[in-house]
Amino acid sequence: MLSFRLLLPLSLSLLLSLSVCGHAASAPERPNIVLLMGDDHGWDETGYNGHPYLKTPVLDEIARTGLRLDRFYSGGASCSPTRATVMNGRHHHRSGTFAPGWSTRPQEITVAQLLRDAGYATGHFGKWHLGPVKASSPTNPGAMGFDTWLSHDNFFELDPSFSRNGGPPQVIKGESSAIIIAEAIRTIDAARRAGKPFFIVVWFGSPHEPYQALPQDLALYDNLPTTFANRQVKLTSNTTGRNTTRLQRDVLRERFAEITAMDRSIGQLRNHLGTVGLRANTLLWYCGDNGTPQEAVATVPFRNHKGSLYEGGIRVPGLIEWPAKISRPRATDVNAVTSDILPTLCDLVGRPLPHRPLDGLSLRALLDGTMAERTAPICFWDDAIARHSGAKPYLDPELQKGTTPLVKLGPDGTATRDFKNYHHHEILPQDFAGPRAVVGNRYKLVVDGTKGSGRELFDLRADPAEKNNLIATHAAEAEKLAAVLQTWQRSVLESLTGADYR
């Protein structure tokens, strides 16, 4: 059988064979790096993307002064999968992180490990969701490359419960976005005193449901259109922790207030960086982890929502600010994805890439203003790989038990969440099934995007809402993308068997 590398388009094959990032960077040139991610924050839910009601002045300012990524994608259609792509630069199926609540694997090489080895101080704050955050977990933030962390196994609301460096959960009173930004600032200041560059990851709990917000933020959305009250939506009750039904207008008021609070906390971070003279050489990268969830769909211009491989499930806000290098505001329609983060940061600091298949590519040329289009398509695959009969847990189930409580109760009535991951020793024909998609510079092929839908081809430049299926008139284009997708799936499944770790 031909290898995945031999069957790939030349540009992607070269990417996967690189052992060293193309540009070295001396220590004084290395940027400080802050990655920020909203939880369930959809593409249109910002002022700069034209939302008619939301107030996001800080994100809007970054969009006006930095690099606006108009075609930015989450690597997965839900939270844990996308977070794996950020950490590893690889599709989440490679590490068995199929869906929310599936952990990563300890053998994965993370961007935090690579930057820590390059001399960066590293810290994680907020939602982790790649395994438990307790000290005994082999996939906690510390095990995956972070010097310090104040983190939660899953999502959180006001007065959140966090684990500090793997210790027992502790409740911290206050608005959650402000709490984790304050922790990030403390770590930044410690790194500055030590004369070290920093790599900070802040993964907000907002605006994931159930929604809780401060009165001052709620008041901004008292006058949402009454038409939003014509629909009942399902979400979690803050009182019972179980499903309830409410008017969408009330739900959106709370959700929008959470987004505004998150936006304000990002402003607090930027202001602090400016005060201590670090803002110019700090690369700040903001994105969402998936599209808008179903209960909040009201103004989304794309097809479908969170959990889907149509644009409504994977197009998210994307912004990069780095005043020392991006001195003039720009917007780009080049396709980019969360798995690009690791190779991009490696390239910027001159670190070797891991010797294993990556699914992202460096966006350094995009930051320089010299990338006109992406050199390889982006492939997506939803959580459809079934656990093989008799498959053994990848990690001791005791190590996969979560400790940090959340408002939403699990199916068994508990307030904590456990994780899972399984060995996958062989590749079976049924493993290639499930919703999947490949996005080229113009066309997007979706396979089994909805039950029984088969193949769909869309011209995203002319039809971003994916209304017109061109499969009958553009068969050759569809076949070309299908071949890329099939070859890529084989590579992903080989990684899933653990081949990359041997």
Image: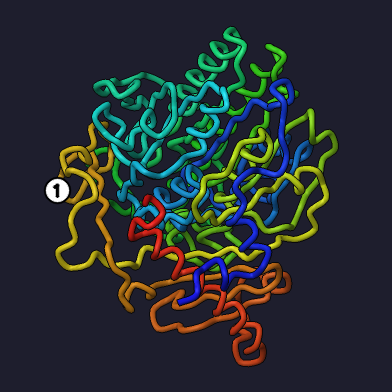
Q: Residues within 10 Å of mark 1 (few under 14, many from 20)?
A: few
Q: 150 or 87: nearer the eye? A: 87
In x, y percent, where is residue 103? Answer: 32, 46
Please give left or right for residue 145 compared with residue 19 in the image.
Answer: left
Q: Which residue is mark 1?
A: 412
Query: Which residue does the image show at 74% across and 25% down from the upper left?
Result: 29
Q: Quadrant of the N terminus?
A: bottom left
Query: Which residue does the image show at 15% across and 39% down from the upper left?
Result: 398
Scheme of colours in the image? rainbow
> In the displayed image of the protein, which residue is found farthest to the right?
328
Q: How many marks?
A: 1
Q: Quadrant of residue 205?
A: top left
Q: 22 or 331: nearer the eye? A: 22
Q: Quadrant of residue 31?
A: top right
Secondary structure under tag 1 reads loop
* Residue type highlighted by circle 1: Asp
